[in-house]
Amino acid sequence: MRIRPIEQADYAGWRPLWDGYNAFYGRAGDTALDEAITCQTWERFFVASDPVKAFVAELDGQIVGLVHLVYHPSTTRQCDVCYLQDLFTSPMARGRGVGRRLIERVYAEAQSKGCSRVYWTTFEDNRTARALYDQVAQYNGAIMYVQEIAS
């Protein structure tokens, strides 16, 4: 297995994983993300000054996992922090350590950028993912609230 920064040539392998990730969170069909958001997300990965970055997992020459992260300042720390925003593994590669390796890569990258924390969210009932997360990070009891703002 190889974990590496995403490349422009990875779009065909990345897109089905991105669509699967969004479907898992209810963003499919009538509730799918606008295509412009997907295009913008993809383009951001390749802008050096953008805080959004991406890595992929390759297994036997195929992209089988993705992770997207965002670096940002914090009001409670002197150093930046890293938000692990999206993590997804193809169903055929699950149970093979892909998610763990992607998280470990985020940790290494965040450390190399001088970040003092990596954090992420998931749904309370996402038991499969939480089984891994409980092994690689500390659950701090946080609950996330969301309010959409019309633009």
Image (tube, helix red, strand yellow):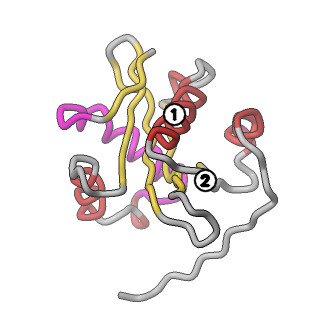
x, y (%) of residue 76?
A: 64, 69
Q: Residue furthest top?
A: 60
Decide: marks 2, 1 in contact (CB < 8 A)?
A: no
Relative depth, front residue between 73 and 145:
73
Residue at label 2? 120
Q: Which residues are magenta?
A: 7-28
Residue at label 1? 108
x, y (%) of residue 102?
A: 51, 32
Up the image or down, 49 lies above or below 13; here it is: below
Relative depth, front residue between 44 and 95:
44
Determine the image quadrant of residue 20.
top left
Q: What amino acid type is highlighted by mark number 2? A: Trp
Q: Residue at x 50, y 32 (%)?
A: 105
Q: Residue at x 36, y 26 (%)?
A: 63
Quadrant containing the N terminus in the rendered view: top left
Left or right: where does residue 25 sit relative to residue 128?
left
Between disc 2 and disc 1, the foreground one is 1
* Total marks placed: 2
x, y (%) of residue 91?
A: 52, 29
Up the image or down, 144 lies above or below 81; here it is: below
Up the image or down, 104 lies above or below 48; here it is: above
Q: Main secondary structure of the magenta part?
A: helix
x, y (%) of residue 148?
A: 50, 82
Quadrant containing the C terminus in the rendered view: bottom left
Q: Which of the two discs, 2 and 1, labels the residue nearer the N terminus?
A: 1
Relative depth, front residue between 132 and 38:
132
Q: Secondary structure at mark 1?
A: helix
Q: Residue furthest right?
A: 141
